[in-house]
Amino acid sequence: LVSRSFSPLSSQSDRPFGIAFDIDGVVLLGDTPIGGSPRALRRLYDDSGKLKIPFVFLTNGGGFSESKRAQDLGQLLGVNILPSQVIQGHTPFKQLVNRFENELVVAVGKGEPAAVMSEYGYKNVLSIDEYTSYFDAIDPLAPYKKWTTKPDIDQNSTSKETAKRKISVQTQRVQAAFIVSDPVDWSRDIQVLCDILRTGGLPGRESGKQPLLFFANDDLEYQATFPAERLGMGAFRIALEAIYNRINPIPLAYTSYGKPNPFVYANAEAIAETLLRNLMLLNKYGENSINHRLGWFKTLYMIGDNPKIDIRGAQRAGDRWFSILTRTGVFKGKDNHSEFPADLVVDTVEDAVDFILRKEC
Ligand code: G3P
Ligand code: MG
């Protein structure tokens, strides 16, 4: 690869370009960088390590705060990543905080789902691990489980305080459940969510109006370290919905976030524009340009591995999005995907970045 001096301001046009990277199956498999991703990303920085091309990570995954994820990704990939460059499936939950700021809400999924929500400003959020611990025998299979889902509750609290807390949790209605990341204990989570959802947020009581339910994404499958795709949050949603609709007369109501929803791409564009502004690369366009809304980028590149999610989303997001499909994840075909063909198919993320830089600079 030839190393050239690149700028996000294309030489062929007055308007800049930005890049959105999918993570699982493009940049990482599990915790392992793939497809030359560290090398590819380094090309977006100058020699002193300063960012020169506005880019974001646009993943449906999550479970940790954007700041922690930025730090972890930075370490794995060897570049400096800002928390604002990390857009996860659950990032839009930040926008819902006003509706639920002081209400009891339950956060589900791997990692630290309640910590994620607290960082977004939710003041009365419990992880499903902690919530479940206040209801004796709510999970009849718990004694047979060889792992522990016991939450790390305040060790200094007295048994009197714990008892008080238990009563308070048991008598407060859960107003919403947020599936922040991939659920770990499906059997317990489906059981407890069914309890919360069909009782109006008071497990063990009579039926009531369904609390709101939000999913960070609806991915049926995604690529992790195992050679075949793994079941994702969309698969969990199908399982929960199928069971809930058999035991409850009113069908499950829910909202799913994440790619391929077009608003996720619009948000990524807005963040990339802010990055561009912060890079002080807009002086060429004058001060008036600072107050514009979306539309600065000539081209936004989405590099993804999942045709139904990443590529379909880019297609829906509008003409300025150019989709690049890699062969390192869910898509393993030789030719383009038949139903959701990408604008370009390449082997790796490194090939994708090489293509973009050659085209733009
Ligand atoms: O759980 C992660 C998965 O659903 C997708 O992640 O980075 O491929 O959008 P990503
Ligand atoms: Mg992916």
Image: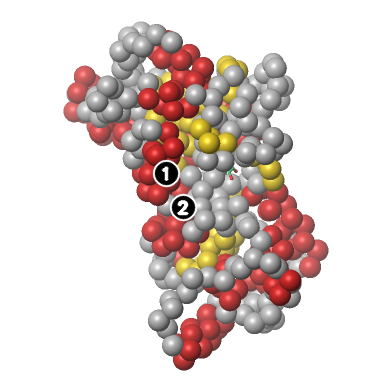
Disc 1 target residue: 72
Which residue is depicted at the point 39% across and 8% down? 2
Q: Is disc 1 placed on a helix, strand or loop?
A: helix
Instruction: Rate crowding at label 2 as few (under 14), some (14 to 19) or many (20 or more) other CA atoms within 10 Å.
Output: many
Q: How many marks?
A: 2
Please give the name of the residue rendered at 64% of the width and 66% of the height, measured from the top-left corner. Answer: 147
Query: Left of 109 or right of it: where is 293?
Result: left
Q: Is mark 2 within 8 Å of ligand 1?
A: no
Find numbered disc 2 in the image and state the secondary structure of the residue it sits on.
loop
At label 2, the amino acid type is Phe
From the top left corner, tell me how far across and down residue 251 is, in percent: 73, 61
Question: Left or right: where does residue 328 sit relative to residue 45?
Answer: right
Kind of residue sitting beneath label 1: Asp
Image quarter (top left, top right, bottom left or bottom right) of the C terminus = top left
Which residue matches tag 2?
64
Would you say residue 267 is visible in this rendering? no
Residue, x 41% and y 62% (percent of image)? 118
Q: Please determine whether, in this image, residue 286 is positioned above or below residue 120.
A: above
| Disc 1 to disc 2: CB gap under 8 Å | yes
Q: Position of residue 313 (x, y in %)?
A: 57, 33
Marks 1 and 2, how far apart at CA: 10 Å
Q: Earlier in the sequence, mark 1 or mark 2?
A: 2
Q: Nearer the observer, disc 1 or disc 2? A: 1
Looking at the rendering, the quadrant in which ligand 1 lies is top right
Estimate the x, y position of residue 193 in percent, counting from the top left.
65, 66
**Going by the picture, which residue comes out furthest to the bottom?**
160
Give 82 or 97, whichever is nearer the viewer.
Answer: 82
Q: Quadrant of residue 358?
A: top left
Q: Residue at x 40, y 49 (%)?
A: 68
